[in-house]
Amino acid sequence: MNYTNHLKLGYNELIHKGKAVVTSLNSVEFRKSMKDIQNLPAKVGTIPPGFEHRADKISNLFYNTPDLDWLICWTNNISDPFQQLNVGDRIRIVSI
């Protein structure tokens, strides 16, 4: 099967809660791309009031698109933005 998703980074099929799920996560291509992203130059940003818990709004602020919310979470090791992205937190913003 030739599968592409919104990230277009490989194909990985797994079982989640008893159902087959297709994802790019942990595919060879995904891991390589994430390693490449970690090596990009970065700045440090601070989450302003009104942007807490909103990776989409933070992405829009720094990248002019809400679609890179996953990048904010990935590069800052955020697994739960509703608990971890708080006002005043310093976060890494990679230059893309």
Image: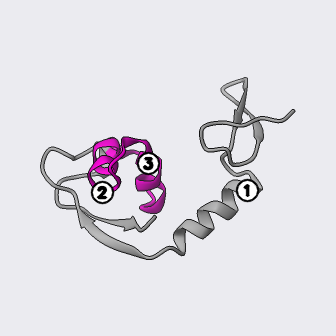
Residue type indicated by callout 3: Leu
Q: Is residue 89 rendered to the left or right of residue 59?
A: left
Looking at the image, residue 18 lies above or below residue 34: above
Q: Residues within 10 Å of mark 1 (few under 14, many from 20)?
A: some
Q: Secondary structure at mark 3?
A: helix
Badge nearest the viewer, 1 or 2: 2
Tell me the residue that label 1 is attached to.
Answer: 29
Cα distance between the residues tagged 3 and 2: 10 Å
- List the single residue furthest toward the left: 49
Q: Which residues are magenta?
A: 55-82
> Could you tell me how far apart the alpha carbons at marks 1 and 3 are, in whole angstroms?
18 Å
Residue that numbered label 2 is attached to: 62
- Residue at point 44%, 76% (across, down): 41
Question: Which residue type does callout 1 highlight?
Answer: Glu
* Residue 66 screen position, x and y as percent: 36, 42
Position of 20 compared to 43: left or right?
right
* Coordinates of residue 12 in the picture (x, y in percent): 76, 42
SS at circle 2: helix
Q: Position of residue 16 (x, y in %)?
A: 68, 30
The residue shown at (34%, 46%) is 55
Quarter of the image with the N terminus is: top right
